[in-house]
Amino acid sequence: MGANNDIELPIDDLWGKVLGKNIYTATMSRIRFGELLSLIRFNDKQTRTERRKQDKFCPIREVFYKIDELL
């Protein structure tokens, strides 16, 4: 979505017939994406403001490093 500049579009539009792209429908269903989006969180809201003052990458830094180690 970031590569296609679709990050601001509503989920229904991404999977829609007018604005949607095949990459989204080929990857997973709209319902499944919505479920995953509602469950996955990479950031602690209670400490976000303080951490973000020093590190704008903080919401996903820990996950990024874990993935990097696995690869």
Image (tube, helix red, strand yellow):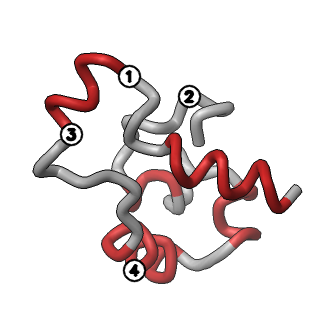
Q: Is residue 7 above or below residue 71?
A: above
Give the amino acid type for the residue marked by disc 3 in the picture.
Arg
Q: Quadrant of the C terminus?
A: bottom right
- The numbered dot on residue 48 is 3
Counting residues from the start of the chain, the first of labels 1 and 4 encountered is 4
Q: Residues within 10 Å of mark 2 (few under 14, many from 20)?
A: few
Place of residue 29 in the rendered image (x, y in percent of width and height, measured from the top left) = 57, 78
Question: Can you identify the residue that label 4 sits on?
Answer: 35
What amino acid is labelled 4 in the image? Glu
3D distance between C-alphas at marks 2 and 1 = 24 Å
**Residue at mark 3 to residue at mark 2: CA–CA distance:** 25 Å
Numbered disc in front, either 4 or 2: 4
Q: Residue 34, position in %: x, y? A: 40, 72
* Above or below, 11 relative to 30: above
SS category of the residue bearing label 3: helix
Q: Are marks 3 and 1 in contact (CB under 8 Å)?
A: no
Residue 18 shows in the view: no
* Whole-percent x, y for residue 19 in the image: 53, 45
Residue 54 makes an appearance in the image: yes
Q: Amino acid at mark 1?
A: Asp
Judging from the image, what secondary structure is the residue with disc 1 in? loop
